Amino acid sequence: MATMKPAVLIVDDERVICEGLSRVLSDDFETCYALNGKDALDIVQSKGNIDVMLCDIKMPGMEGTDVIRKIRSANKDMVVIVMTAVTNPKKVCEAMRYGANNFILKPLDIPLLTSTIRSAIKKRD
């Protein structure tokens, strides 16, 4: 019997990032993506089985910090990893204060991202 892969939601306003990450992470994880905060919240609500959310901070409409805050109010167990090119430490600190478990800087190092996801899942379990 095959074990289920952890589900990863990628939230970024750049489609190329979402599609690229989805492709490279799909060997190890079930992936889906949202191009904005509202769609991310809808996916979390409808699927209900997201293990990890990778979330950009700087997005039009709803910033990643708002997405994290809203998700945390409903889901305490989901692992949230911020991926950002924002070098403003205040934004990263704000994301952590709202409930992000970790962060990784863009451009993304895929082996580091994968190990960060795995480590965060292990800590949660």
Image (cartoon, rainbow, N blue to C red):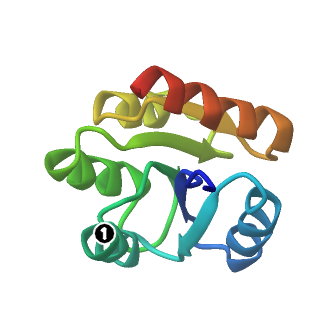
* Horizontal relation, residue 30 to residue 65: left or right: right
Tell me where residue 80 appears, x and y as whole percent: 44, 42
Q: Nearer the viewer, residue 80 or 60?
A: 80
- Within 10 Å of disc 1 (Cα), the crowding (few <14, some 14-19, many 20+) is some
Seen at 56% across and 34% down, the residue is: 88
Quarter of the figure that contains the C terminus: top left
Name the amino acid type tagged 1.
Answer: Leu
Q: Quadrant of residue 21?
A: bottom right
- According to the image, label 1 marks what residue? 41
Residue 56 in view of the camera: no
For the N terminus, the image quarter is: bottom right
In-image side of 16 versus 44 (left or right): right
90 relative position to 108: left or right = left
Residue 8 in the image: state x and y as whole percent: 54, 56
Q: Is residue 84 above or below residue 27?
A: above
**Quarter of the view holding residue 45:** bottom left
Residue at point 82% right, 60% down?
Answer: 24
Query: Where on the picture, by quarter, is residue 78?
Result: top left
Question: Which residue is farthest top?
Answer: 123
Determine the residue positioned at 26% across, 53% down. 71
* Residue 66 visible in the displayed image: yes
- Please, what secondary structure does the residue beneath circle 1 have? helix
Q: Residue furthest left?
A: 73
Q: Would you say 56 lies left or right of 114 here?
A: left
Determine whether 17 is above or below 66 in the image: below
Q: Residue at x 73, y 39 (%)?
A: 113
Number of numbered discs present? 1
Q: Position of residue 112 (x, y in %)?
A: 79, 32
Give residue 35's position: percent from left, percent from top: 53, 77
